[in-house]
Image (cartoon, rainbow, N blue to C red):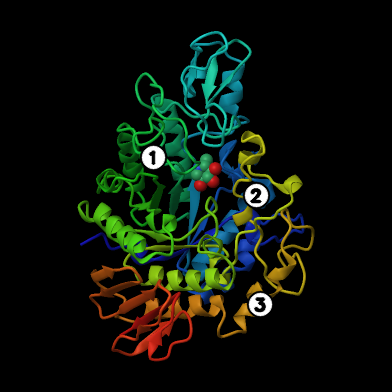
Amino acid sequence: MATMSWWSNAVFYQVYPRSFADSDGDGVGDLGGVRARLPYLKSLGIDAVWLCPVMRSPMADGGYDVSDPRDIDPLFGGIEALDELIEAAHGLSMRVVMDLVPNHTSDQHEWFQEALTSPPGSPERSRYIFRPGRAASEPPNNWPSIFGGPAWQQVPDGEWFMHIFAPEQPDLNWENPEVFADLEKTLRFWLDRGIDGFRIDVAHGMAKPPGLPDMADIAHGMLDLDDDDPRFNNPGVHAIHRKIRTVMNDYPDAVTIGEVWCKDSTRFGEYVRPDELHLAFNFKLAEVHFDAEEIGEAIENSLKAVTLVRANPTWTLSNHDIEREVTRYGGGAIGVARARAMMLLTIALPGPTFIYNGSELGLPNVDDLPEEVLQDPVWERSGHTIRGRDGCRVPLPWSGTEPPFGFTTGNSWLPMPPEWVTLTAEAQQSDPNSTFALTQAALRLRHSRSEFSGDLDGLSATDDSVFFRRSGGLSVLVNTGTKPIPLPAGEVLLASGPITDSVLPNTAVWLV
Ligand code: NOJ
């Protein structure tokens, strides 16, 4: 039996703050915007909000480059805006979890600025990973940065510093005790202000292997990483998570959710042992096609990964780094139908579920953003060959008939497609057949019906259907094929599309 706590079965909603709702007309979403929309999230059925980084940042990577981890960026409304948000969310019995970025800082962080003006070998440099090159103009090893180009940048005195992501995100040296001491301060700072936990960025990345050996194979997609990639999943990372957990244990109600890209189930499970992270993101379901066997395997492997260590599984279909599911499943009406079916499948699984902002509206990726508006560092770093993640970060359409659809009173930081007029929250809230209405109905049932309890059993995933039961009494069928499937016996609780005596292709049904 996995741990029971508020988060063990919670519905989390991921807010990408720049894109959710703008309260001050500068075209960028902010915490005032999130606070104003809390009633919307409450009515949707959300238990907890996860905020992508809102700490002080020059925004070289949308806030994942933190220059002061114990302050909120003025772009998002400053620290008072967070206090107000936490208070308002708690008033509505919702929790607030924030992103924490311990693998790297911004190059504008005072530590890194001190490192740049200090000599090689100095204590200031030892907070980061500075090394001499292999030759005068050759980096210390062959590691590529996730965003393209080498993972090293040379400074004027000849040394190189490591940046697994952008050069504006130098990696911290976790062998230096000052680094954990500072993170502990950050953890306590936010927990003492009432935050309910943290999503930990690159939680599989902080420890680096001794000697920083070359990578055997450097041809990888951004998130298509092998488990033997020396940049990630090094054994030393677990000692760091144990230290973080020691601090978290002083706040027994708070949760940590690690971003862990690790294919092997046993190794994945190690991150959620009882003295490490509470939860870890499992991306298996977000990586599969709309294919019964692939979906079945993803569910089985996700459960296997956590069962041995008695942790809870987590489920998600998308986030701010991944193409939106409507587009991934084929786009257009089919993409929407499949995304709706997968939404029902995910919400029916045991354990916490994470909904990325806009999934409840069935938003597609925006793949035709003009090149001049692209902001993801991947675009520049790849020499304009990879457009990056802006297409899944386009602001949310709230109301009205033309862009920016109530997102802002100014100009939205990324342009919004005029076709989204039918997808606004306002339009969908009054349409009983909308994706919003489906998500809301699904979450109401999940929260209120006892059938959504117990383990998963009877999982079968053949060529064209996924079927499983919850021991509490719910049955779930998803038709991933091209022919109708006879409706199983039982009372239909909810379906993602029209149901007769059969379940049509690209449709999911819940029965009791
Ligand atoms: C993972 C985050 O989800 C992503 O958006 C970010 O670019 C990298 N970590 C670097 O912090």
**Residue shown at the point (48%, 29%) measured from the top left:** 172
Residue 501 point in image, percent of width and height: 38, 91
Give left or right: position of 396 versus 447: right
Q: Nearer the viewer, mark 3 or mark 2?
A: 3
Q: Would you identify the image quadrant in which residue 244 lies?
A: top left
Above/below status of 233 relative to 308: above
**Residue shown at the point (38%, 39%) measured from the top left:** 226
User: Residue tagged by mark 1?
Assistant: 204
What kind of residue is marked 1?
His
**Mark pair 3, 1: CA separation:** 40 Å
**Residue shown at the point (39%, 77%) measured from the top left:** 447
| N-term-proximal mark, 3 vs 1 | 1
Give left or right: position of 438 versus 346: right
What kind of residue is marked 3?
Glu
Residue 31 point in image, percent of width and height: 63, 57
Farthest top residue? Answer: 136
Q: Nearer the viewer, residue 31 or 143?
A: 143
Residue 9 point in image, percent of width and height: 35, 66
- Disc 3, SS: helix
Circle on res. 426: 3
Circle on res. 148: none
- Disc 2, SS: helix
Q: Quadrant of the N terminus?
A: bottom left
Can I make out residue 124 in this image? no
What kind of residue is marked 2?
Gly
